[in-house]
Amino acid sequence: MIPHLKKSLVLIVLPMILWGQDSLVNKKRLNTVLIGTGTLYTGSLIGLGTIWYEDLGRFHFFNDNDSWGYTDKLGHTTTAYQISRIGTDIFEWTGLGRKKSAWYAGTASLVFLTSVEVFDGMSDEWGFSLGDMAANTIGAAAFLSQELFWGEQKISLKYSYRKSPYAQYRPELLGSSTPEKWLKDYNAHIYWASANLKSLAFSASNIIPDWLNLALGYGIDGYTGGSSNPSENSKGESIPTFARQSQIYLSLDVDLTRIKTKSKFLRSAFNTLNILKIPLPGIEYNRTNGLRYHWFAF
């Protein structure tokens, strides 16, 4: 584990050291970012190693493209997008230009997620997934391409979580604690593509608020296994039969970064919370129930 951590950390830190040669960069802020990035990177991987991984073995590949109804791939895409987005703001704070910050934030995002994928490659339960790597690349590219061509994020990739009833049947796989469920129980996840209405289609209208979005979401229900549902868990306890199905959502959303405020604290909080889809009215479609209305879709 440690050699991979060191190599990946060098790939993140070295370009940032080179940036320090730019006279416009605030050296004090750059040092703060260097230390903070290294600490967060290392701590995140150690935390994942504690929660998710146990014994690591020989590196191998694994095809999981048909697992969890593709929600794990959407999770990779959304994670890469959000790391790139937040990383760009942090790097720009040091005095770097916006486009340069976006390029290196996207690179740092891929380095971090590749490190996680290497852990998967050495795990007996999983393996190095080319599908995951493709999803990571798409997520980073989704942010970078909008930043380079539009200079803004017209379509944001977001995440929401609502408790599901399935983790109790396979806690060893879906999680036994709340933090584990946030990571492992894909039944509880919804991934959203949230489009800013005024930016995309109504730029000439003063009726549409700057911050109003329309979001398309995707989730799953009834999954107690990746490719199929087992009849028993690891303790030999029976698991009820559940219908595996996809859920499609259409809902209003808020782009918190477009809310005008003079408060630096609120701007920072809004920027961080923009990872999450805001609970607002919406509709859901699934095979069992057809169309359903939700006062708060998240």
Image: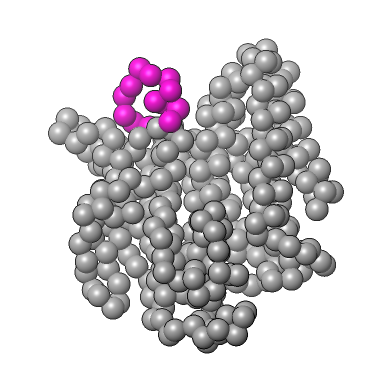
Above or below, 21 relative to 91: above
158 vs 251, left or right, is right
Q: Which residues are magenta?
A: 257-269
- Tell me if residue 88 comes above or below residue 249 in the rendering: above
* Residue 200 in view: no
Residue at 20% x, 62% y is 293
Task: Reply yes or no: does residue 263 show up in magenta.
Answer: yes
Looking at the image, which residue is at 58% across and 53% down? 136
Q: In the rendered image, which quarter is residue 292 located in?
A: bottom left
- Give whichever of 48, 205 is nearer the camera: 48
Asked if residue 106 lies in the magenta stretch, the reply is no
Q: Name the image quarter holding the C terminus.
A: bottom left
Residue occupying the far right of the picture: 3
In this rendered view, identify the residue nearer to me: 189 or 218: 189
Determine the main secondary structure of the stretch shown in magenta: helix
- Report the residue at 30% width, 72% height from top: 286
- Please name the residue shown 49% across and 51% down the image: 78
